[in-house]
Amino acid sequence: MLASRKLAIVILLHMQFWETDAVSLFDDDKSGMRMPVSLITGFLGSGKTTLLNRVLVDPRMARSLVLVNEFGEVGLDHLFMESVAGDMVLLQSGCVCCTIQGDLDRTLRDIARRRSRDETPPFDRVLLETTGLADPAPILQLLLNNPMISHDYRLDGVVATVDALNGARQLDEHLEAVKQAAVADRLLISKTDLADIDSSARLRARLEQLNPGAPLYEVVQGDIDPALLFDAGPFDPAGKSDRVRQWLNAEAHEHEHEHGHDQGHHSENHGRDRSRHDDHIGSFCLTFDEPLDWDRFNRWLMAVRASWGDRLLRVKGVLDVAGESRPLVIHGVHRTFHPPTLLARWPDDERRSRLVFITRDLDRATVAASWDEVA
């Protein structure tokens, strides 16, 4: 009873979330009107610079804009073709490289302004490299729901590099490294040519447990298909429905857990060393078999955000909302969520609502039980 009263109070205090008429609430997917941004993250020494140097000479990077902190850090001297501005150069591959001037949001807004005035070479997508110590959450929040940014840009996906030689130690010692890997849509394991087979296998197994929804790719000397850095998100201007299924990858997070209506329990991993950072981070999927009442779902998610927002590393969802024939996509980081968006069609015949949670010190049973407290 006490938990129910607490949840009700939280709901009343946070009614500002998505509080509009249902008819006007859901926007159609307008991804074709916004620039897709791919985030490449990874801890210090994990191979981001080597990877960038390799992909930036690839002609398939044409019409891409790459944002880096400093040209010198990436070592692009041999790649310069001509200077467009003090912070922007056009490379031989046809892509544009630009340094981040001051705050990221100011740089993105300045680029959008220059692009609208034809003051930059043409580009159709953005690749943003973070620093090795960066927590990706603030950048994801900026791209998800900052009106000044989301007018021109949309988050496409997150790619994280992990060092096969030092990755296990970095995951043990640095929470940032764990977050980078946990929230990624795709994981690139670098330096596998230098690490022994057993170490690489253990790291791969650890990453699969930490982030079961992200496909793993091995990278040697940064040699990858540049396509792996793009098109990892749910929104596709061409309307391809399989993108959202790949982005959500709910099956990887479901395991044996199901939440048809009001059942489902979280099984603890007994016997594991809870001193490891990634033992505090987990993922799970809640599945709802019947169409969701939007008002109830909205109030519940508001309460979840208010109660545990700091523990929500990432939330992805494809929802079957009562009265709506098309799938609704939601996407959030901590307490910041992208406005709900309608896709053109369902990715397959299965129209159950699925919500994937990547969390820190928050288990499935707690979140699932909170659903039953919202009438």
Image (tube, rainbow, N blue to C red):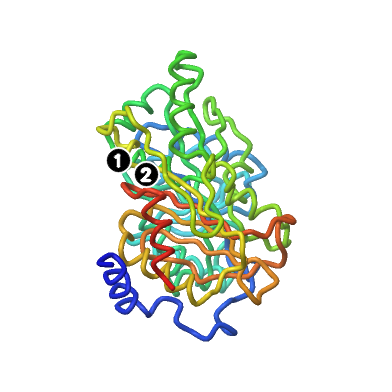
Q: For residue 116, what is the image quadrant?
A: bottom right
Q: Residue at x 46, y 14 (%)?
A: 198
Can residue 74 be seen in the rendering of this structure? yes
Q: Pointers 2 and 1 in contact (CB under 8 A)?
A: yes
Relative image position of residue 187 (x, y in whole percent): 51, 37
In three-dimensional space, the C-alpha distance between marks 2 and 1, rounded to whole angstroms, equals: 6 Å
Q: Which mark is residue 179?
A: 2
Left or right of 325 on screen, residue 175: left
Relative image position of residue 316 (x, y in whole percent): 51, 56
Q: Which mark is residue 175?
A: 1
Q: Is residue 295 above or below residue 98?
A: below
Q: Mark 2: which amino acid?
A: Lys
Q: Residue at x 49, y 20 (%)?
A: 201
The secondary element bearing badge 2 is classed as helix
Q: Is residue 200 above or below residue 327?
A: above
Can residue 213 be seen in the rendering of this structure? no
The secondary element bearing badge 1 is classed as helix
Q: For residue 2, what is the image quadrant?
A: bottom left
Front-most of residues 257 and 247: 257
Relative image position of residue 46 (x, y in whole percent): 41, 32
The N terminus is located in which quarter? bottom left
Mark 1 neighbour density, 10 Å: few (under 14) some (14–19) many (20 or more): some
Left or right of 291 on screen, residue 142: left
Q: Residue at x 41, y 49 (%)?
A: 364
Relative image position of residue 277 (x, y in whole percent): 30, 37
Q: Residue at x 62, y 46 (%)?
A: 61
Q: Is residue 349 above or below residue 215?
A: below
Q: Which mark is residue 167?
A: none
Q: Mark 1: which amino acid?
A: Leu
